[in-house]
Image (tube, coloured by chain):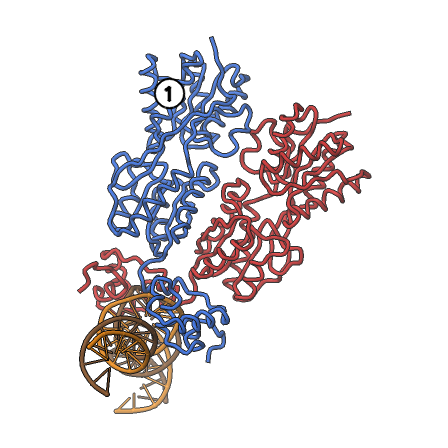
Chain colours: A blue, B red, C brown, D orange
Amino acid sequence: MRLRSKVDLQAVADAAQVHRSTASRALNPATRHLVGAAAILRVQEAAHVLGYRRDALAASLRTGRSMLVGVMVPDIVNPVFAPILQGIETALARCGYSALVANAGNDAQRQRVVAGQLIGHRVDGLILATAAEEDSTVSLALEVPIPIVLVNRAERICRVPSVVSDDGAGMRLAVEHLVAEGHRRIGHLAGPAHLSTGAQRLAGFCAAMREAGLDGCAVVQAQAYRRSAGSLATVELLRKFDVTAIVAANDMLALGAYRAIAALGLRCPDDLSVVGHNDMPLVDQVAPPLTTVRIDPLGLGGRAAGLMVAWLEDGSAPPAMLHVTTPSLVVRGSTRRIG
Amino acid sequence: MRLRSKVDLQAVADAAQVHRSTASRALNPATRHLVGAAAILRVQEAAHVLGYRRDALAASLRTGRSMLVGVMVPDIVNPVFAPILQGIETALARCGYSALVANAGNDAQRQRVVAGQLIGHRVDGLILATAAEEDSTVSLALEVPIPIVLVNRAERICRVPSVVSDDGAGMRLAVEHLVAEGHRRIGHLAGPAHLSTGAQRLAGFCAAMREAGLDGCAVVQAQAYRRSAGSLATVELLRKFDVTAIVAANDMLALGAYRAIAALGLRCPDDLSVVGHNDMPLVDQVAPPLTTVRIDPLGLGGRAAGLMVAWLEDGSAPPAMLHVTTPSLVVRGSTRRIG
DNA sequence: ACGATTTCCGCAATCGATTGCAACAGCTGA
DNA sequence: TCAGCTGTTGCAATCGATTGCGGAAATCGT
């Protein structure tokens, strides 16, 4: 006597006059061929009539697979991550997986805790958009062990598959564009050094400047990828160096630079050109429209999810290599020809 | 003989020389008082040494609670939803719950499918940011039944607890501001009529116009909350009506209006004032900075999550009422005094 | 018509944690 | 000394679906 007459597999089986196991097989496309046509019909009919809903939880317990992939982002409000998430979700969905998204913040310890919770919920794998150059959550995943893929940010030494935009190439595009527009004194608004995007873009900037025969030491580092940090760093940059253009490690920092420039009574691009990085949503409509390095966030997310699915289906870990996508430059109104 | 020597509760119990059940109780703060102090110590020690990780899945199967709340948004890339999600997540986390976020798109049928998947994953409740004025996913949830709360968008007739911003008040703020600035001929860029935000804001606009003694029939409806739809609708609005100001149902539409205005060779705010709605991230830095109605997305999300948790903990459904938060107006550069 | 296959289906174990029930030890008070 | 109580612990059932194994039934060939 069940008060809450839940429709479980048993109920369907009873209604269809077959055994639970037969009902299970009839309902699962992969095992359906083991069941007679008449039985399949009866079971499907019964399931439909009773409004049966398969309990993924119980199935996961038995099969050991949840069809869930945990995705960690540092800050869901940062528009950069939305399209990456989108790319991950659609790619996962195509293969029958869902994303369990967690907003983990920037603190490494909290990230580990959150990862632990995801693992506790039996996610089949982890995709991190949070990785630091030396990331303890990656270590955790390797210990457990659980499949893990990095996206957007990679570790310095590559321990797991990672898909990132070519940060060096991106900075070269930015610097070459500015040089072509007549700029010589170019500053860099660097991101946090413990993140690959911060470190790689700084390195790329310096390399590009050297290649152009310029001195690349006009660098100030922002504390975080936030507008406020970008403003602060810009003020410092302009105080220390005499530049005509700024390459920011990130669109958020570039927007911070906009504010600082306005606050100092200067104008962009008349007094100062600015180049961002990521081409995140809406930067085409800020004032002035931001010239920026476009990464392909949907592609990034899609490839990361693809690697994860391949890992899960194949069962063996893919090589711990860097998968790099090439960025492009979108020239808008924040850069101008000088001299 | 287990090849993959998984540490389950049994392993911990063995190491601590107690029964599984004792180990379970010792590890659960709520039942710990039933266990002797010595045993607790041994169990905790063993769990720590073995690196035991509680399997939330198995626990959920037994207890019937997953501590997961499904959250559906129509478009994760739309920056409006990020802060709402943020609010939901932090409020849930404070109570030990996590959010299972699903990007369901705008199609009602797909939304039902996604909701079904969430339910299949045994989420304890559903929070919808996708609701239409008559929403079939809500019907689904009521049938199942499963706790459900609406956020940002409500149904026309309130079947479940819903927390929304006071759309009527928001439009009144917008219209009154424009009237105070000397505008008389004001148009409305309406959102989709099947969404409460579209319908309520339209109604609010008309009411506010009437109150101001003005004729409020300069209305064109956008097909969706996207910039492209906003552009199209704006072109039509300006073709049909001679207005000096536009109140958009949504910031995305307002940004679309910006584009259309520029494309028509006009300028904002010189030729046309524009007011948005939501104050989503970054609209403070578009050109010109958008005057908009600020809703409190974190508060919205937080209250929705709070209602959900109360429902889950209490066990009985809270009244199916509308919870309304009052918006405020943020005056920036897209509106100007005329006459 | 009979043995050999193939097809279909039921049985029971399994995943890992939780929890009602009962047993048990040690203690108190009569 | 024993009934009764309290505080701990063990036992076994339970949540719901999956799946290896073996047997029954149906089909086929000769």
B50 or B105, nearer to the observer: B105
- The residue beneath circle 1 is A219
Relative placement, left or right, of A198 versus A292 is left
In the rendered image, which quarter is residue B53 located in?
A: bottom left
Point out residue B188 in the picture as x, y percentages from the top left corner: 70, 38
Please state the total of marks drawn on the protein image: 1
Relative placement, left or right, of A79 versus B294 is left
Point out residue B124 in the picture as x, y percentages from the top left corner: 47, 61
Q: Is residue B250 above or below residue B242?
A: below
In the rendered image, which quarter is residue A168 located in?
A: top left
Point out residue B2 in the picture as x, y percentages from the top left corner: 19, 63
B248 or A156, nearer to the observer: B248
Point out residue B44 in the picture as x, y percentages from the top left corner: 27, 60
For the residue marked with disc 1, what is the amino acid? Answer: Val
**Chain ID at mark 1:** A
Judged from this view, the residue extending furthest toward the top is A339
How dense is the environment of label 1, judged by Cα within 10 Å: few (below 14), some, or many (20 and up)?
Answer: many
Helix or strand or loop: what does disc 1 sit on?
strand
Q: Identify which residue is drawn at 59% across, 27% down.
A: B287
Residue B25 visible, this angle:
no
Q: Quadrant of the C terminus of chain B?
A: top right
Q: Quadrant of the N terminus of chain B?
A: bottom left
Q: Is residue B119 above or below residue A194?
A: below
Q: Is residue B205 above or below residue A168?
A: below
B180 or C8, nearer to the observer: C8
Residue A187 visible, this angle:
yes
Q: Is residue B15 above or below residue A171?
A: below
In the rendered image, which quarter is residue B149 located in?
A: bottom right
Q: Identify which residue is drawn at 43% across, 29% down.
A: A294
